[in-house]
Image: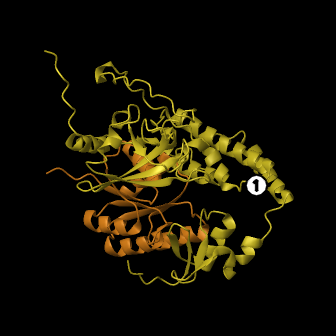
């Protein structure tokens, strides 16, 4: 039986950012299965179904805030490691995300190698 | 959809419906003070009732506060220059404050932590030129140290060029329509040159991506793909699926170079497809020779192209048989 490649779910309402993250991980050489969601509700649906090992999560999104998604993911898909990727990187926001269970916080704009490193770390 | 009950705390939002919360008051104030609230225009104390940000009592003082004085920014610039002088003769490990046997991964982590505060996007557009220059110098020094570290380690990881550099063809200069050139067939795959390996990362500011800057907003274009509209992929001699684009007949004025989020809607699988696009050609004459509209170059991945080619194959009207001579 083939082992399934680890799954990374990319959650951002900006298609351009989702492409950037997808490109960074595709070019990394890591064997990953990449999924995308354009908002928090889609993210929760996909995560419940696919049980991703890692979620890359934006914070400022339509209808459902990234912080709300993070809280629900910690409850509904506790095995997923969530890395927040956001331009809203004020210190209290970072602390709040980490206390809510995020495995990491990467400020936008990001370098592709930051993303690869964070996913590698999250998969350990 | 029905409103979910919101956790207590503060919320920020923008005009497109994006929200962030629940936040502590300190978090809200820090975000406002930092200038990182791109596009956020309103705030709420419960996630349901919203006020325009300038009217929100908890942050009014921050919004009306004068921007930092020149003297303050010049002092900041001098502090950065002092740090630069201290770092000038240090090697990568000392610069980044890591052990001599630290791995490349640890060095990179330290680089990202130290360099990000000096990124150009961190400063307000009106920031003093001296502060901008000092920050840029610091960022460049840190980038240089990171490149040195990679060279010493003998590892230069193959780069995915930043997607912003891979984006769509710049728009042509002409504003008036000209007859499209004859379409040349693509060379067979064997005849194409082998792809060059991507260059190594330089760690300069242009490699940091993902922040939408002012003026980079994209318009949304929703296009219904049916048997009647399949021509958007095939009818135009230049901008068509083979060349990676579509022609949209529309009287809506669009400027060349306009960036688009294009959503293609299908009645069957895949249902919808989200793509990035840019306007690369326009025909705005109402001369009856062809419809007014725009050529949009699309950023199509191979799997997406396959789906679109299948759609065109399925729905394109068969060509009229040519008359034969007797």
Residue B110 is situated, as x and y percent measured from the top left of the image, at 57, 51
Percent x, y for residue B87? 71, 44
Please identify the quadrant where the C terminus of chain B is shown. top left
Q: Is residue B32 left or right of residue B300?
A: right
The colour scheme used to paint the residues is by chain
**Looking at the image, is B211 positioned above or below residue B18?**
above
Label 1 sits on residue:
B126
Quadrant location, the N terminus of chain B: bottom left
Q: Residue at x 65, y 74 (%)?
A: B53
Q: Residue at x 37, y 69 (%)?
A: A41
Q: Colour of chain B?
A: yellow
Q: Give the quarter of the image for residue B205.
A: top right
Give whichever of B273, A33 is nearer the camera.
B273
Look at the image and give the colour of chain A: orange
Residue B213 in sight from this viewpoint: yes
Residue B173: x %, y % from top left: 58, 32
Of residue B150 and residue A52, the one placed in the foreground of this image is A52
Count of numbered badges drawn on the protein: 1
Q: Assess disc 1: are there few (<14), some (14-19) or many (≥20) residues with their C-alpha within 10 Å of its C-alpha.
A: few
| Residue in front for this viewpoint, B219 or B125 | B219
In this picture, is B128 found above or below B291? below
On screen, B192 above or below A20?
Answer: above
Looking at the rendered structure, the secondary structure element under dot 1 is loop
The residue shown at (45%, 28%) is: B180
Residue B182 image position (x, y, % from top left): 40, 23
Describe residue A23's horizontal placement relative to residue B148 as left or right: left
Tell me the subunit letter for badge 1. B
């Amino acid at each position: 039986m083939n082992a399934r490649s680890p799954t990374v779910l990319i959650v951002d309402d900006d298609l351009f950012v989702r492409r950037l993250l997808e490109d960074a991980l595709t070019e990394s050489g890591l064997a990953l299965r990449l999924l995308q969601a354009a908002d928090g509700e889609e993210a929760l649906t996909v995560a419940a179904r696919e049980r991703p090992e890692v979620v890359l999560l934006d914070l400022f999104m339509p209808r459902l805030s990234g912080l709300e998604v993070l809280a629900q993911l910690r409850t509904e898909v506790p095995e997923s490691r969530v890395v927040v990727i956001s331009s809203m990187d004020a210190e209290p926001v970072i602390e709040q995300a980490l206390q809510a269970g995020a495995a990491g916080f990467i400020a936008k704009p990001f370098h592709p190698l930051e993303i690869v490193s964070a996913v590698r770390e999250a998969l350990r | 959809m029905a409103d979910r009950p919101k956790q207590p705390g503060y919320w920020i939002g923008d005009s497109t419906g994006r929200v962030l919360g629940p936040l502590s008051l300190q978090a809200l104030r820090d975000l406002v003070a930092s200038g990182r609230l791109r596009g956020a225009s309103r705030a709420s104390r419960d996630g349901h009732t919203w006020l325009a940000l300038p009217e929100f009592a908890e942050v009014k003082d921050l919004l009306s506060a004068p921007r930092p004085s020149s003297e303050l920014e010049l002092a900041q610039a001098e502090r950065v220059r002092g740090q630069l002088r201290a770092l000038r003769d240090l090697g990568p490990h000392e610069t980044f404050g890591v052990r001599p046997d630290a791995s490349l991964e640890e060095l990179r982590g330290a680089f990202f932590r130290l360099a990000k505060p000096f990124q150009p996007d961190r400063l307000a557009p009106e920031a003093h030129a001296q502060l901008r220059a000092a920050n840029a110098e610091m960022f460049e020094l840190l980038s240089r140290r990171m490149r040195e570290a990679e060279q010493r380690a003998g590892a230069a990881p193959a780069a995915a060029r930043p997607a912003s550099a891979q984006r769509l063809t710049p728009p042509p200069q002409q504003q008036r329509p000209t007859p499209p050139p004859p379409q040349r067939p693509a060379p067979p795959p064997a005849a194409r040159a082998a792809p060059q390996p991507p260059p190594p990362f330089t760690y300069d500011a242009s490699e940091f991506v993902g922040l939408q800057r002012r003026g980079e907003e994209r318009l949304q274009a929703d296009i219904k793909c049916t048997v009647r509209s399949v021509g958007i992929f095939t009818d135009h001699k230049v901008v068509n699926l083979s060349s990676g684009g579509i022609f949209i007949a529309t009287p809506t004025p669009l400027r060349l170079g306009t960036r688009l989020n294009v959503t293609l809607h299908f009645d069957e699988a895949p249902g919808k497809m989200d793509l990035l696009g840019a306007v690369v050609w326009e025909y705005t004459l109402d001369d009856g020779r062809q419809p007014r509209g725009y050529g949009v170059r699309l950023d199509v991945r191979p799997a997406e192209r396959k789906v679109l080619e299948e759609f065109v194959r399925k729905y394109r009207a068969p060509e009229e048989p040519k008359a034969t001579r007797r």
